[in-house]
Image (tube, coloured by chain):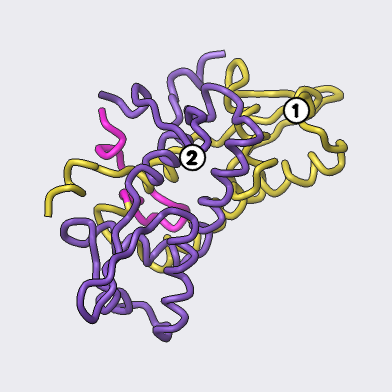
Chain colours: A purple, B yellow
């Protein structure tokens, strides 16, 4: 099934549809902008991609600093912003915290930005 | 063809793939974050959706203030940010400026955030 056939809703119950299909409501725009703002930082985008592309879609915080030249407190600060925006979930197991992407949130944003290029080129 | 099968590149020629498939490079993250930052404002998200969902994917600046309670200079300011980030193109025809979404840019972001939920749930 194409993503366009799915019914994704935001936390207020509003259905999220591609923005090329219908104008985004003020309420949905406010909620979506919070997630996009959290994503709009190169470090956070890289951290999210490290978690998302990790085996099983989950990564230990101890694995997140590889290749990212920042201190652990700075990385934790960025992880907290992603978590607060609802893009990452975390769980403590033993000594470590494990992060996992919130797939619904990413799917929602991907669907929002989906463009039907055939429709767009016909006027 | 699924979006995952497409090869989209950024302006530096780097191939953009879903972030759940591979970590985003520092260079791609910097470029993608600029577009996401431009999108991370409720008014700009609504303006972009009005243009994208308009017949033919194009809208006159004169049609963009409907339902958005802002002055024309403020709307122009937001449109300029979307244009600078490479999300909107504009063209003057007669007295009016017409806006059109840059479909490649939106496709790139949609692809980036695409999540294969089946893969994510299997570890």
In the rendered structure, the answer to whether residue B61 lies left or right of residue B40 reads right
Q: Quadrant of the C terminus of chain A?
A: top right
Please tell me which residue is depicted at 48% across the width and 75% down the height of the picture.
A77
Q: Number of marks in the image?
A: 2
- Where residue B65 appears, x then y in whole percent? 79, 29
Please tell me which residue is depicted at 64% across the width and 23% down the height of the picture.
B58
In the rendered structure, the answer to whether residue B105 lies left or right of residue B88 reads left
Does residue B6 belong to the magenta stretch? Answer: yes
In the rendered structure, the answer to whether residue B91 lies left or right of residue B73 reads left
**Nearer the viewer's eye, disc 2 or disc 1?**
2
For the residue pair B7 and A46, the one nearer the viewer reads as A46
Residue marked by disc 2? A11
- Where residue B123 appears, x then y in whole percent? 12, 55
The local secondary structure at tag 2 comes to loop
- Where residue B40 appears, x then y in whole percent? 60, 50
Residue A102: image tag: none
Q: Among all residues in the image, which is located at the extreme left? A: B123
Please tell me which residue is depicted at 45% across the width and 61% down the height of the picture.
A82
Q: Quadrant of the N terminus of chain A?
A: top left
Please tell me which residue is depicted at 60% across the width and 39% down the height of the picture.
A29
The local secondary structure at tag 1 comes to loop
Q: Tell me if I can see residue B8 in this picture.
A: no
In the rendered view, tell whether residue B118 sits above or below residue B35: above
Residue marked by disc 1? B64
Does residue B57 belong to the magenta stretch? Answer: no
For the residue pair A92 and A48, the one nearer the viewer reads as A92
Q: Tell me if I can see residue A75 in this picture.
A: yes
Residue stretch rendered in magenta on the structure = B1-18
Q: In the rendered structure, are the residues bearing label 2 and label 1 in contact, judged by CB atoms less than 8 Å apart? A: no
* Quarter of image, res A75: bottom left
Instruction: Give the chain of mark 2.
Output: A
In the rendered view, tell whether residue B14 sits above or below residue B109: below
């Amino acid at each position: 099934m194409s993503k366009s056939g799915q019914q994704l809703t935001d936390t207020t119950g509003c259905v999220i549809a591609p923005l090329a299909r219908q104008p985004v409501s003020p309420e949905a725009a406010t909620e979506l902008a919070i997630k996009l703002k959290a994503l709009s930082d190169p470090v956070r985008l890289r951290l999210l991609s490290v978690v998302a592309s990790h085996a099983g879609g989950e990564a230990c915080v101890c694995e997140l600093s590889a290749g990212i030249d920042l201190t652990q407190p700075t990385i934790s600060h960025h992880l907290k912003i992603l978590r607060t925006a609802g893009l990452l979930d975390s769980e403590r197991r033993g000594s470590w915290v494990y992060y996992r992407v919130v797939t619904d949130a990413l799917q929602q944003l991907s669907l929002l930005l989906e463009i039907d290029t055939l429709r767009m080129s016909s006027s």
